Image: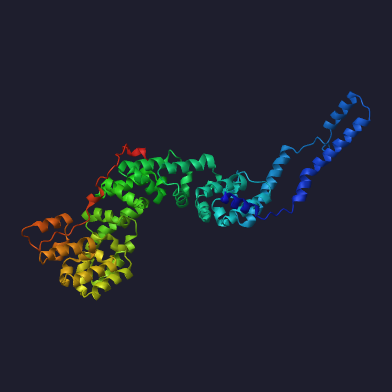
Amino acid sequence: MKILQELLTLYFQIPKWNPRVPSLIEKKYGSIARLQYSIACKTFSSSSVESSPMNQSTTHLGRRQGGSSSWYSRPSLLEMKNERIANRARVYEFLRGLGIVPDELDGVELPGMVEVMRERVDFLHNLGLTIEDINSYPLVLGCSVKKNMIPVLDYLGKLGVRKSTFTDFLRRYPQVLHASVVVDVAPVVKYLQGMDIKPNDVPRVLERYPEVLGFKLDGTMSTSVAYLVGIGVARREIGGVLTRYPEILGMRVGRVIKPFVEYLGSLGIPKLAVARLIEKKPHILGFVLEDQVKPNVDTLLEFGVRGVLLPSMIAQYPDLIGIDLKTKLCPQQSFLNSTIGVGPEDFCRIIEKMPEVVSLIHSSIMNHVDFLKDSGFSLLQVRNMVVRCPQLLALNIDIMKLNFDYFQKEMCGDLDDIVNFPAFFTCSMESTIQPRHQMVAKKGLKCSLGWLLNCSDEKFEERMDYDSFDTEEMEMETQFDMNTLLEPREEESSSEYEEDSDDEYV
């Protein structure tokens, strides 16, 4: 109700210039007044003068056959057509005077009076739209303020679409002003809610992607959702996926989504793993396959990344295939080389283990390098540590300081031990480092950090139960495990969707 009041206030506050109204009224209604006066006089005359029925009939017949001055005369169709043409010409002249090009308005029903068109332009202007915006979609001038604009905007306001977003909303999808709230807009809103998008999230979805209001319910929207469920996206996740990236509803399966999924599959990423990635980061479906994804994969291979590791790299950091790698790889490698002496081959090994490195800002990298150097590590040691554990460049420095203080004060360790196992900084102090160290110290054992920390809790408990063991035993450093994306979920229903031919999605 508040939005409606504001819109009505906005409408009635529009200045109404009408200097021609008296003359227009006189022109339009003057002949009618004279006609009524003439009828009144003739009626009075007929009541006071005796005349026969024949004479009356002859008189009326004569009047019907009279000239244009007869009170029976009406504008001809040609005259009415010429008047409409003249009115439209005046409206066009008014619009051109504002800088609006009306060429696309031929055939569109427009108001015949300049004053009414002025109200529409002023209303759109008060909503934040400029002349350039109107020129980009001049058909909006065919919308009535009272019949079209206010009802639609009032409905959107009641849904929760913020008034501050109306300008951008209309710039992106001005066609909404032509829509019927009951026939066009409300059914789409109901459909979104049926996709488990929370009522409070529907306004945000519309603000982010207003074009969704123009889609057919049984068209692209339904097929894109069905395909995602078919490859393994959990039904209970669909609402969240669409809320975070509603653009999916406008994507054609056969032209966009399916080719993207199949290409990642050709690289070695199973469909179910792709489904999990979409659940976590649905915006990856917006990466253009031919212009972004494939060129980025080619760039990585040309740079020296091993193809067998591409699947794990993309699974760890899906944005890797959507950013402009050509402008990032060389500058980042050059910076690491000048900072800690990382060469091209070592840089490839670094991004294979932690692809996010390509997006780290230089100031953050320097902060971490400075911390390690200030802790007593040499530049060569820092380089070796970063190559073995690139996460050192992105960890929370406060947590790194906490771990290092415990290592020095409680564990009394040697720096070389950290150099050999730099992943020490990635371990949790409370859940891993402290309790395990205390158990080993209680047994009076002296072991390497790798033996102590580079294993699961179950494996460590087994080690503590051994009668004898090699305290220098270490497990191999692990890469990202794709199987973590393929683990079944509890209470996850199987998909009823089955893929048919490729021609089904076009």
Residue at the spot x=27%, y=53% of the render? 315
Q: In this view, does 382 lie above or below 485?
A: below
Q: Quadrant of residue 365?
A: bottom left
Q: Can residue 123 be seen in this view?
A: yes
Residue 37 vs residue 315: left or right?
A: right
Q: Does residue 443 lie above or below 193 as drawn?
A: below
* Residue 62, x across and y down, in percent: 86, 30
Q: Is residue 52 above or below residue 469?
A: above
- The colour scheme is rainbow
* Left/right of residue 464 with respect to residue 401 in the rendered view: left
Q: Residue at x 24, y 74 (%)?
A: 373
Q: How many labels does the image show?
A: 0
Q: Can residue 245 be seen in this view?
A: no
Residue 65 percent across, percent down from the top left = 83, 31
Task: Tell me which corner region of the image, top left, top right, bottom left or bottom right, holds residue 375.
Answer: bottom left
Q: Residue at x 80, y 42 (%)?
A: 31
34, above or below 435, in the image: above
Quadrant of image for the C terminus: top left
Q: Which residue lies furthest to the right in this view?
A: 49
Residue 334: image x %, image y %? 28, 69
User: In front here: 166 or 109?
Assistant: 166
Q: Which residue is drawn at 71% across and 40% down?
A: 80
Q: Position of residue 383 (x, y in %)?
A: 21, 70
Q: Answer left or right for 168 relative to 265.
A: right
Q: Which of 482 and 96 is in front in this view?
A: 482
Farthest residue in the left direction? 468
